[in-house]
Image: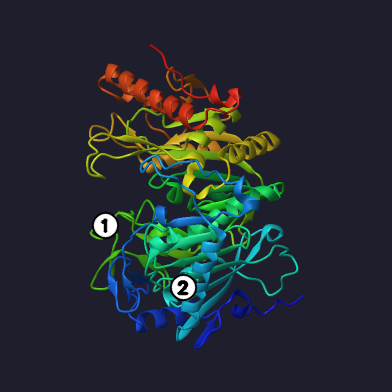
Amino acid sequence: MRKKQFDIREIGIHPKGKVIANLDVGGLVTCAVKSEEGKLSRTGTLVIRTREDHPKYGHGRHTGRSPQDRYIVDHPEIHDHIDWQVVDAKSKKPINHPIKPDVALRLYKQITKYLSGQPVLYLQHRLVCADRMYGFPLYFVTESPTYALFANNVFRDLPATTKEIPNKPIHVLFAPGFRLRDPQKYGLNSNGFAIIDCSSQKIFIGGLRYCGEAKKAVFTLLNYLLPFMDVFPMHCGANKGEDGDVALFFGLSGTGKTSLSADPHRKLIGDDEHGWSPYGVFNFEGGCYAKLINLDRVKERDIWSAVRKFGALAENVGMQDGVLDLADASITENTRAAYPCKYIENVSFTGVGEHPKVIFFLTADAFGVLPPISRLTPEQAMYHFLSGYTSKLASTEVGITEPVPTFSPCFGLPFMPLKLLTYAELLGRRLREHDTNVYLVNTGWTEGPFGKGHRINIMHSREMIAAAIRGELEHAQTERHEDLGLQMITSCSGIPDPLMLRPWKTWTNVAEYRDKSKELAAYFVKNFQKNFPDAPPEIANAGPKLRN
């Protein structure tokens, strides 16, 4: 069966101008530069700014996602499935904002009217989910060649036939130049918005220019749809070895997920979003969206190189005389680049793999308390998956003078619309079905907290991860951490000083370590009791314990 030609009139867009479908990378880059949406580096990276004034798109406000401007259409048939009560730990505001169907429809009609009137529209035919049994055709419509390039880089090629793709399409309308005159009339927080309609599988974004809005809106939609198809959706990186053994890497921003999953000795399946079905693992996307600030040319050479290839799209990155400056945080710390997975030297072009042999939960513990690596039981894995711990550093925000614990359940709370225990139960079931080993890896601080100690060497983290993948740590000697209840690995090949595996051995003041350890355990307990009072006892009892 041949692929049906998609007609944008099917989704209410009746273009008065030209529609350019599936323009290649070179054409998109050329159009973006001609329209002054960005500048080219010497190597061909398109560099854009999302917070500067633009003659067409107006003033940009954001260099990251705008959580309070994202809405889910509250249809009666989905209402009871969505967790409307879950709140962001920082803002204390709900994560999933409902919008009434009739209000969403009025906004959708305004977006389609706006796009219909543009002189040029760019349409990209893409695919999400590498396993075609679970694949969704994705049709991305925008007035901007830059965002069409983003879609081309991040999502997968749509195959010539749709025979093996049984699911109905996802439509994304991205209108960065759209401005809503009276957002209060619609109950919105600002004149920019991202709206997800889980029933019609439409996403429409107006007045926002950060590329990640589109990526994470699609991810959120998949996190709603896939559990009903017996697929565990995951915010993680994935790679596989020569014999096909798969490793998964969960972690929040800054924990090393992208860097550690891009292993030159293993094929990258994907760096960010995956599904675990009854048949194995598959990547949702066909590209990477890597954080770039202070990227190291030696330690993270694959990403460093990919960012500099022709057609890569860099957001808010510094550039001097045509050369990218990845240490420049003058616009934002959240500098990003979108590029196809094929820009990574050692990549799996299929985007699929077997059931994972090993899973890593990555956390950057700025308290310097967590062991470098610990082995988890399935119940502990579910506990730490629901906790999603890392820490915010002193000096990164006004008023923060000490490390602050950050908990993002499922290692991606803003993108998980269903009740959170749904995802944890899927994880637990898959772990037991396939006897998968799980390790908690601290990529944060050792020899003291942030400000006194230092960051664990990423090369040491790679050695520990490699040993776990080889199976060396399945029966390695462990020691129980008295506050956190973790089974710490106490011996690992490639680690020059085994004392670093027992974190208190690296501190000059052991009593200070014990105090910080109790403090961190208390944070875990308080967070879990507050957010998961109805968790099954076997999960709730698998976490840290308070002691006198």
Q: Which residue is drawn at 44% across and 45% down?
A: 94
Depth check: give the residue in front, 4 or 107.
107
Quarter of the image containing the C terminus?
top left
Q: Name the residue under label 1.
A: 327
Q: Which residue is drawn at 46% across and 24% down?
A: 490
SS class of the residue under badge 2? helix
- In which quarter of the view is residue 512 placed? top left
SS class of the residue under badge 1? loop
The location of residue 184, given as percent across then percent down, is: 38, 60
In the image, what residue type sits under mark 1? Ala
- The reply to whether residue 231 is visible in this rendering is no
Q: In the rendered view, does 281 fall on the left or right side of 271?
A: right
Q: In the rendered view, does 224 fall on the left or right side of 44?
A: right
- In which quarter of the view is residue 362 placed? top left
Q: In this view, does 191 lie above or below 94?
A: below
The location of residue 377, given as percent across then percent down, is: 58, 27
- The reply to whether residue 371 is visible in this rendering is yes
Q: Which disc number belongs to residue 149?
A: 2
